[in-house]
Image (spheres, rainbow, N blue to C red):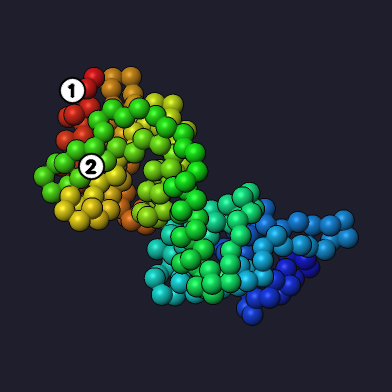
C-alpha cells in the first residue's frame, strides 16, 4: 500500500508514468519504516516536476523519451539523493529544464576520472572528431546524445576502450558517438550511435575508417 500512496503524499495530482515511478524506487528516493509507512526524500515540488517529465513522452515519442528524459530523470534523482542540492523557488517554477541544467552544471564542475588521449581532436572533411578523455565528458556526451556512453567510463579509464564524439565541424552540432575497442591485434571499431541510440547515416563509415587508419598508424 505504501508503494501506491507515496505519490499522493508527495502532492502529485496524477500518478507518474509507471517507468518514472519505478526509477524513483531504484534511485533510493524512498525509505520504509517497520510499520510499512513510506517516506519520500524528494521535495513535493520536485516530485511534481516528474509530472512534466512524464508528459514529454506524448510530445516527443515514446522511444525518444525512454532513451532521453527517462534516463535523465533517474540520474537527476540519484544526484539529489547523494548530493542534496538546494533549489530555489524560481528553479522549481521553471521546472524540469532548470533542474536538469543544474545537474549538467554539477557534472561539469565535479572531479573527473581522466585518461590520456591517443588521437586527441582533429578535423576530417566536414566533421570535427573529438576524443573523450574524462568521465565528465562521457557523462555530458551521454546526456546530450541520450545514450549510454557514460557506462563506458571504467573501460576507457582502464585503456580498453576509446570514445569519440563526432560533430558538424562548422557549427559543432553533435552527430554521433563512435566507440573503439582494444583487441590483441590493435583497435577495432565497436558501436556507433546517433541521438537516442539511433543508427547514423552510412556516410559515417568514412569517419570510422579515418579513426581506424589513424589508430593503426599510432600503433
| Residue 122 vertical position relative to residue 145 in the rendered view, above or below | above
* Residue 85 on image: x %, y %: 60, 56
- Residue 28: numbered disc: none
Q: Is residue 205 left or right of residue 49?
A: left
Q: Which residue is mark 1?
A: 217
From the viewer's side, name the closer residue of 162 and 208.
162
> Left or right: where does residue 210 sit relative to residue 48?
left
Q: Earlier in the sequence, mark 1 or mark 2?
A: 2
Image position, residue 69 (x, y; %) = 47, 62
Q: Is residue 74 left or right of residue 185?
A: right
In the image, residue 5 above or below residue 145: below
Quadrant in the picture for residue 21: bottom right
Q: Residue at x 32, y 41 (%)?
A: 191
The residue located at (33%, 56%) in the rendering is: 195
> Circle 1: is it few (<14), some (14-19), or many (20+) Cα within 10 Å?
few
Disc 2: which residue: 129
Query: Residue 174's x, y, as percent?
Result: 27, 53
Q: Quadrant of residue 184?
A: top left
User: What distance separates the C-alpha of mark 1 from that of mark 2?
Assistant: 17 Å
| Quadrant of image for the N terminus | bottom right
Helix, strand, or loop for circle 2?
Answer: strand
- Which residue in the rendered view is the most extreme toward the left? 125
Quadrant of the snapshot with the C terminus: top left
Mark 1 element type: helix
Tag 1 and tag 2, C-beta contact below 8 Å: no
Residue 58 at least partly seen: yes
Q: Nearer the viewer, mark 1 or mark 2?
A: 2
Left or right: 52 with respect to 59?
right
Amino acid at each position: 500500500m505504501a508503494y501506491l500512496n507515496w505519490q499522493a503524499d508527495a502532492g502529485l495530482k496524477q500518478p507518474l508514468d509507471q517507468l518514472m515511478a519505478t526509477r524513483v524506487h531504484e534511485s533510493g528516493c524512498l525509505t520504509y519504516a517497520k510499520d510499512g509507512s513510506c517516506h519520500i526524500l524528494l521535495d513535493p515540488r520536485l516530485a511534481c516536476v516528474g509530472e512534466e517529465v512524464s508528459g514529454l513522452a506524448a510530445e516527443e515519442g515514446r522511444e525518444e523519451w525512454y532513451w532521453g528524459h527517462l534516463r535523465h530523470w533517474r540520474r537527476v534523482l540519484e544526484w539529489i539523493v547523494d548530493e542534496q542540492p538546494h533549489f530555489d523557488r524560481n528553479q522549481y517554477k521553471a521546472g524540469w529544464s532548470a533542474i536538469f541544467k543544474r545537474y549538467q552544471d554539477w557534472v561539469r564542475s565535479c572531479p573527473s576520472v581522466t585518461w590520456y588521449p591517443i588521437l586527441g581532436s582533429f578535423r576530417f572533411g566536414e566533421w570535427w572528431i573529438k576524443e573523450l578523455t574524462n568521465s565528465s565528458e562521457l557523462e555530458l556526451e551521454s546526456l546530450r546524445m541520450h545514450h549510454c556512453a557514460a557506462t563506458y567510463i571504467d573501460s576507457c579509464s582502464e585503456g580498453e576502450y576509446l570514445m569519440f564524439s563526432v560533430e558538424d565541424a562548422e557549427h559543432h552540432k553533435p552527430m554521433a558517438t563512435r566507440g573503439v575497442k582494444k583487441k590483441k591485434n590493435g583497435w577495432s571499431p565497436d558501436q556507433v550511435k546517433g541521438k537516442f541510440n539511433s543508427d547514423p547515416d552510412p556516410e559515417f563509415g568514412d569517419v570510422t575508417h579515418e579513426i581506424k587508419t589513424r589508430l593503426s598508424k599510432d600503433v
